[in-house]
């Protein structure tokens, strides 16, 4: 049965635009999120009949659902916490993320055993809950934009329930090449591809990821399976207006003063800001910096690596271990090369957006060297807010390479020696060249800001 308040434009994602926390007095506090989808839904106008379907992620969210607390334009699903944990951590983050980022140590993993099958059933249940909710909430002929690898099965499930809808799916991660994708059991590979091909249109951040999906679809189901589904590319850009305004607010200015004091007068900075996500390659970045100090002693005391590595997915043991390893490596470099008046690595593990923006502004070099990344907005954000211009050292495996590679110093993310040399080249780049490259990087980085990116998807879906 379709809701009497059926929506014309719907977004579905694991995380929604609002979250709730439970105060000590039992009341609920709501916090609004940001990002491209929030900007995009806002861009279609207040009069648009839209709805965001998302999952309740914590106790506060679940209590809000139980109490009937709601935010206009949002439907939060109270899916069983155990089902969510198995679908989100067991499958989405521990299988699909690992496949698409090619992170498995294949002599030992993966092993698709009975536990995997149990968790896969939870992933199916989780996707079914979204499909049912979207089917109930969508007006006849409505446009539905399903987001990311958490919800790969939704398009196919929703198509069976509501063949009248215009269904799109956007993947924010890379897509694995055929040989790696086929690590998955054959029936699971078929389910994932056919689930996505239930959409009228699937889209990706770069042509490379789109082509990889097409290759997998052909290999798994045959070329005829793609008939009826368009494949598009929308390279999410940085929000220049927001970043430039936010980067000059008082809290950022205060952090800028404090960071400059900690770095020291006259020293250059190599800045990275990342989550401690396995694919971000923080450890090899530190190894490259250590190699620079070893090979180029003239840089000792003259450069500081400002490395902000914010904890990610700490409920998974492999992520906790990785975070600890990154911390140890930074400590080793400081112990080996540090002096009373110079700390080679300035590392912080607690998230602070204002501090990150201050680091962006002071960066002489931005280091973005992921093993594999769907896009990487840090590579786009730093040139936008840099005070004096920065040199970008960029992995060829980042989605951003497609747009920014021409003005970056491009590296193989596994090659520590070459990355060390790239850091040296970036530190010694002439100011004029650095300024010109920064201008071009900023222009490319902001070509498709979040609201435009979202509206482009919606327009393409309804036009196809």
Image (spheres, rainbow, N blue to C red):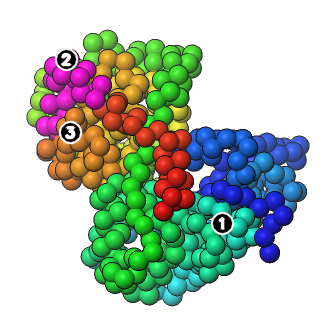
Mark pair 1, 3: CA separation? 42 Å
Where does the image place residue 211, in percent across and percent down from the top left?
30, 65
Residue 290: x and y in percent read 21, 38
SS at badge 3: helix
Judging by the rendered image, the residue that carries numbered circle 3 is 406
Q: Name above or below for residue 17 compared with residue 134.
A: above
Asked if residue 428 is among those painted magenta in the image, a careful observer would answer: yes
Q: Main secondary structure of the magenta part?
A: helix
Q: For the point 56% across and 18% down, which residue is it?
A: 249
Q: CA distance from mark 1 to mark 2?
A: 54 Å
Q: Which numbered disc, 1 or 3, marks the residue that appears first in the sequence?
A: 1
Residue beneath the point at 66% across and 75% down: 162
x and y, in percent, of residue 369 in the image:
28, 45
Residue 133 at least partly seen: no
361 left or right of 334? right
**Residue 40's image quarter?**
top right
The residue segment tinted magenta is: 420-440
Residue of label 2? 432
Instruction: Tell which tag, 1 or 2, sits nearer the viewer.
Output: 1
Mark carried by residue 141: 1
Residue drawn at the location 27% of the way across and 12% of the way down: 266
């Amino acid at each position: 049965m379709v809701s009497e308040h059926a929506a014309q434009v719907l977004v579905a994602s694991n995380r929604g635009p609002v979250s709730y926390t439970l105060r000590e007095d039992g009341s609920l506090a709501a916090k609004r999120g940001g990002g491209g989808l929030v900007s995009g839904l806002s861009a279609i106008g207040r009069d648009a009949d839209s709805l965001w379907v998302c999952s309740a992620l914590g106790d506060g969210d679940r209590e809000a659902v139980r109490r009937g607390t709601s935010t206009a334009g949002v439907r939060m699903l109270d899916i069983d916490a155990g089902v969510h944990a198995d679908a989100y951590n067991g499958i989405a983050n521990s299988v699909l993320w690992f496949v698409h980022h090619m992170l498995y140590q294949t002599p030992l993993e993966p092993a698709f055993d009975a536990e995997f099958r149990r968790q896969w059933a939870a992933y199916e249940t989780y996707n079914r809950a979204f499909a049912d909710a979207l089917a109930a909430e969508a007006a006849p002929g409505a446009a539905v934009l399903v987001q990311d690898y958490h919800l790969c099965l939704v398009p196919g499930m929703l198509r069976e329930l509501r063949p009248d809808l215009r269904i799109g799916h956007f993947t924010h991660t890379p897509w694995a090449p055929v040989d790696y994708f086929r690590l998955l059991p054959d029936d699971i590979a078929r389910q994932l591809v056919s689930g996505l091909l239930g959409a009228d249109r699937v889209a990706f951040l770069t042509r490379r990821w789109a082509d990889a999906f097409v290759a997998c679809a052909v290999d798994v189901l045959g070329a005829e399976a793609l008939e009826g589904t368009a494949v598009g590319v929308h390279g999410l850009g940085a929000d220049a207006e927001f970043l430039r305004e936010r980067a000059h607010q008082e809290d950022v200015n205060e952090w800028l003063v404090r960071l400059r004091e900690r770095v020291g007068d006259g020293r250059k900075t190599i800045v990275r800001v990342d989550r401690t996500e396995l694919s971000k390659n923080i450890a090899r970045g530190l190894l490259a910096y250590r190699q620079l100090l070893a090979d180029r002693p003239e840089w000792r005391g003259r450069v500081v690596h400002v490395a902000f590595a914010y904890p990610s997915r700490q409920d998974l043991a492999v992520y906790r271990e990785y975070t600890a390893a990154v911390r140890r490596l930074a400590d080793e470099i400081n112990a080996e090369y540090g002096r009373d008046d110079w700390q080679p690595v300035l590392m912080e593990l607690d998230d602070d957006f204002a501090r990150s923006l201050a680091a962006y502004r002071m960066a002489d070099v931005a280091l973005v060297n992921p093993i594999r990344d769907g896009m990487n907005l840090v590579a786009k954000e730093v040139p936008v807010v840099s005070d004096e211009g920065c040199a970008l050292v960029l992995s060829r495996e980042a989605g951003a390479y497609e747009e920014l590679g021409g003005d970056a110093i491009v590296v193989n993310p596994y090659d520590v020696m070459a990355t060390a040399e790239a850091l040296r080249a970036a530190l010694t780049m002439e100011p004029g060249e650095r300024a010109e490259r920064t201008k071009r990087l900023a222009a490319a980085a902001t070509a498709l800001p979040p609201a435009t990116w979202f509206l482009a998807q919606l327009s393409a879906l309804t036009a196809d």
